[in-house]
Image: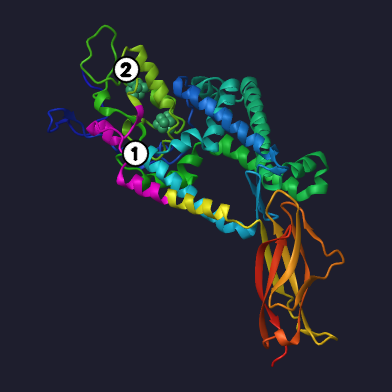
Amino acid sequence: MEPDLPVKAPAYVRADGTLGYDMDESFRDSIGTLDEKGKRKWVFAKKTKGRFTTLRTLVSIVLLGFLFAAPLVRINGNPLLLFNILERKFYILGQPFWPQDFYLVVLGFIASLAALALFTVAFGRIFCGWICPQTIFMEMVFRRIEYWIEGDAPAQKRLSAQSWNLEKTWKRSLKHLVFWGISFLIGNTFLAYIIGSEQLFEIITSSPADHIEGFIGMVVFTTAFYLVFSQFREQVCIVACPYGRLQGVLLDNNSVVVAYDYSRGEPRGKFRKGEERTLGDCINCYQCVQVCPTGIDIRNGTQLECVNCTACIDACDDIMTRIGKPRGLIRYASQNEIALKQPFRFSGRMKGYAVVVALLLGLILTLLFTRKDVETTVLRMPGSTYQELKDGSYANIYKYQLINKTNRDMAIELHLLEPTGGKAEVTRADKHLVVPRGAMLAGQLVVTLPYDRIKGLKTEVTIGVYVNGALADQQTVNFLGPIK
Ligand code: SF4
Ligand code: SF4
């Protein structure tokens, strides 16, 4: 039986006596969705079924449920997640975060990047295939709608090639209408993460003229998602996503990726029932290529286009079962596992990333648990000077800002701690400051010092912030006095 190989050079004999082949690597000259002239090749991916598809469907249902429900969920009356960049107010797991906590956000972001890098070094683009919203929406929502309306890949190809008759018109119109509706839903959900669900409902239920910015945001988000999922599709993963671009530097021979076991599959060749097989297990049926949503042939090796969606694993497992061979010709495996039969090992690089992630997580947790409940800012009123009072003491006026970072209202008192003998008083009529949970209170404060406590032009004064009678924070500022 003759092998059916994409060979460029004749076969050679390896040191261990097995046959090796110089593969034609010209596929690496361009991405899989471009033809020789650089024109986009539309991918008509075939429907898949199998254990990975089922598992991914279940994971997607859970993640989509979370994505759509999270803006509506409240913890102690606070949103579960809110990233209100317009009002600079953030809630993570119901905990309020302010711009003053930005260092935590930055550290969290760095830790997430390090964790993602570790994950990628160990398990390749598993995030892309299982968790990334782009893949989930594209493969589990939009492509399934396409199957439902236009049929499987061959029917889609036929429809695309035929002229605009009644069938093509109604199928395409229905598809794009549904795509637009789902994009509207996704756009609104993302908007809810930014402005909050209450404000979103207000925008939806009132005239666009009353909320022109919100309405524009809604249209922009909806249009962007519609264009991504109806036109740009897999190109997001191939050419736009920066994480995808990083694969080349993150993956090594120990990374577990969706891989074709060429040592078992080659030399590939047609399957003939009843005939004794002298070739490898790959029967060159192209099922793995036909299901690939990024239009590649995984048998060529790891490629930047592969989003580890596992469709080719299911397709090939199905073929292997039919021809009576063990599953796993395409499977999660590292290059070293396939070439050298080495089991998975935690490489030095992985250990290094793990240490960085652990350190960052430790730092974030420490900072989170030692975060003050109340954040105080006291600044001297710009342009003001000291004032001499009738009793011979001197006064300075300050601006204060109190941020309550907890989920309960706070009764706050401000007292002068240093130097003794003076006092700090808020200028408002109601001297009992109550800062509602997750809110900010600002006002003016007058600090008075007797003459003998003033050191000269600048005297340091410390103001204590008491919550329910206990000292919770303190601020030291300069007090302007007469030159002595
Ligand atoms: S090669 Fe396989 S895992 Fe990679 S994108 Fe294509 S079908 Fe998905
Ligand atoms: S599905 Fe499996 S047998 Fe068929 S071409 Fe792909 S690797 Fe070979």
Q: Is residue 25 left or right of 381 when viewed as pictured?
A: left
Q: Which residues are magenta?
A: 331-356
Residue 104 lies left or right of residue 352; in this view the side is right
| Residue 227 image-quadrant placement | top right
Query: Which residue is found at the position 33% from the left and 12% from the top?
Result: 323
- Quadrant of the rendered structure where residue 159 is? top right
Q: Is residue 120 left or right of residue 186?
A: left
Judge whether residue 58 is colored magenta: no
Task: Specify few, some or many for label 1: CA neighbours under 10 Å numbering under 14, 14-19, or 20 or more.
Answer: many
Q: Amino acid at mark 1?
A: Ser
Residue at the limit of the structure toward the top, as seen here: 274
Residue under label 1: 255
- Which of these two is toward me, 286 or 469? 469
Which residue, as the protein is rendered here, is positioned at the far right?
A: 429
Which residue does the numbered mark 2 point to in the structure image?
A: 326
Q: Work out whether 189 lies above or below 6.
A: below
Between disc 1 and disc 2, whose residue precedes? 1
Whole-percent x, y for residue 39 in the image: 46, 39
Reply above or below: 345 against 395. Answer: above
Q: How is the image coloured?
A: rainbow
Residue 95 vs 303, above or below: the answer is below
Horizontal and vertical percent position of residue 399: 74, 71
Mark 2 lies on a secondary structure that is loop
- Between 168 and 118, the one lying in front of the other is 118
Q: Estimate the x, y position of residue 5 in percent, counting from the top left.
A: 26, 26
The amino acid marked with disc number 2 is: Pro
Q: Is residue 24 visible?
A: no
What is the quadrant of the N terminus in the image? top left
